[in-house]
Image (cartoon, rainbow, N blue to C red):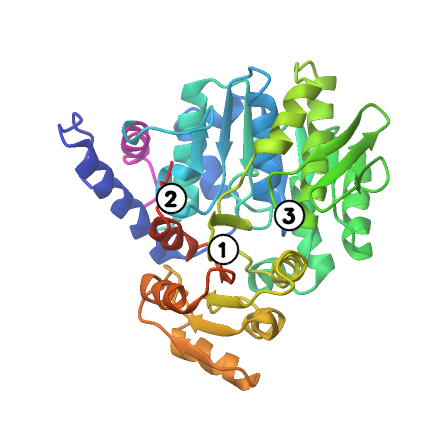
Amino acid sequence: MPQAEAFPVDVDREYSRTIDFLYSFERFGILLGLENISSLLAAIGNPQDQFRSVHVAGSNGKGSTSSLIEAMAGGSGLTTALYTSPHLNDFRERIRINGKFVSKEEIIGATKKILPIYDHERTTFFEYTTAIAFDCIAHAKPDLGIIEVGLGGRLDATNTIKPLVSVITDISREHEDYLGVGIKAVATEKAGIIKENTPVVTGASRKEAREVILSTASALNAPVYEFGREFRGTRTSLNTFDYRSSGMSLPGLRMAMTGAHQMKNASLAIRSVEELVRKGYKISPEAIRKAVETTQFPGRFELLRRNPDVIIDGAHTPEGMRLLKSALLKLYPLRNIFLLLGILKDKYVDTLVRTIVPIAKKIVCVAPHSDRSLEPEALARKVGDMGAEALAADSIEEGFMALMEEAGKDDAIVAAGSLYMIGPVRRACGKSDE
């Protein structure tokens, strides 16, 4: 990428060059730590200190929870920013201002601003892009930024913000090569986002995870609000629930997002908003209700079309895949499930396969769009080791079309196993990026 220059007439071409430049940083892999990102942010004026925020970590549900908080605040007339990862199709999905993708010009400008000062030998993709995100958000001057952790929490690049509320969704074993082995180790990294005297809203249910969060919060004098204790959601039907806490009662909430676990995510979002209201934000019960009833998060049990039903779910952790399986068995008990399966090789491949394969009538294995993808042939062999048969397709699109040709109108096609494979499926179903 060239040094700073005037915007060219062809913004699309310059944007494409910018994204190619950013992806060149993937050669450094994942390097957890705050030294690099702190220096980078300081050099561009510490944009993370120029907006108020909510910080969301967890193994499952942090994207949905973040989106719900953003929708509740935005629905009350507040200006918002949302930073999530990864993206499905367009890099700009990661940074949304008032619900809309940040402009291509903003991405180009922020990238060039950082270009002269980044460390050519150490800066990672996520560090550079987090600096871009914080710069774009600071420029937008939102009333509230909702920031989703990328990986872990304690040493994640986003852990440079000073949030009004820290949110920790449910915790399961994940990324143990980076976060440590076992629930306690993973929870320790997640709990690293807790700040002194800052309220914590959590849905962590496992004993070891709870103990870590409560101990960390106590040491930092941070009040903790736990799902099932200080607040709760009570299911009243497949897609409805009642929310109650000491300060709010919202009966008959109807979820737009599918799956029993989304009730918990919605409850976490509502309790987080209660804390924001305590801090002076005006967020109405009507906006909360509407957000729950309308918010969808791409790639999380997202229904793309009917006859046959096509569902995408980025389930890539054992708990996420278990939740997907549970939702499918409840919603499609008598239908054939055709599975488009793609998994990264650094995931719990055997566990993911073992969980989802038994409910599938036919399985096509594909490679997610990542250099960490497990080859389709290798994944098909894993499926075969379980006594099931799977085909390997050369591309996601090819695999999807093969299942579309075979599935009947009453069947369901499910694309699962990685967030890096569901973008092409959305496009194949005619879904736009924005």
Gap in angstroms between the C-alphas marked 3 and 2: 28 Å
Vertical position of residue 132 compared to residue 384: above or below: above
Residues at marks 1 and 3 touching, judged by CB atoms closer than 8 Å: no
* Secondary-structure class at tag 1: strand
Q: Which of 227 and 179 is in front in this view?
A: 227
* Secondary-structure class at tag 3: loop
Kind of residue at disc 2:
Lys
Which quadrant of the figure has residue 96? top left
| Residue 416 seen in this snapshot | no
* Image coords of residue 3 (percent x, y): 19, 35
Circle on res. 309? 1
| Residue 415 seen in this snapshot | yes
- Mark nearest the camera among 1 and 3 is 1
**Which comes before the other along the chain, label 3 or label 2?**
3
Structural crowding at the residue carrying mark 3, measured as other residues with C-alpha within 10 Å and reported as few (<14), some (14–19) or many (≥20): many
Gap in angstroms between the C-alphas marked 1 and 3: 29 Å
Circle on res. 431? 2
Residue at the disc numbered 3: 58
Instruction: Point out the stretch of residues depicted in magenta.
Output: 106-120
Vertical position of residue 40 compared to residue 329: above or below: above
Kind of residue at disc 3:
Gly
Quadrant in the picture for the N terminus = top left
- Mark nearest the camera among 3 and 2 is 2
- Mark nearest the camera among 2 and 1 is 1
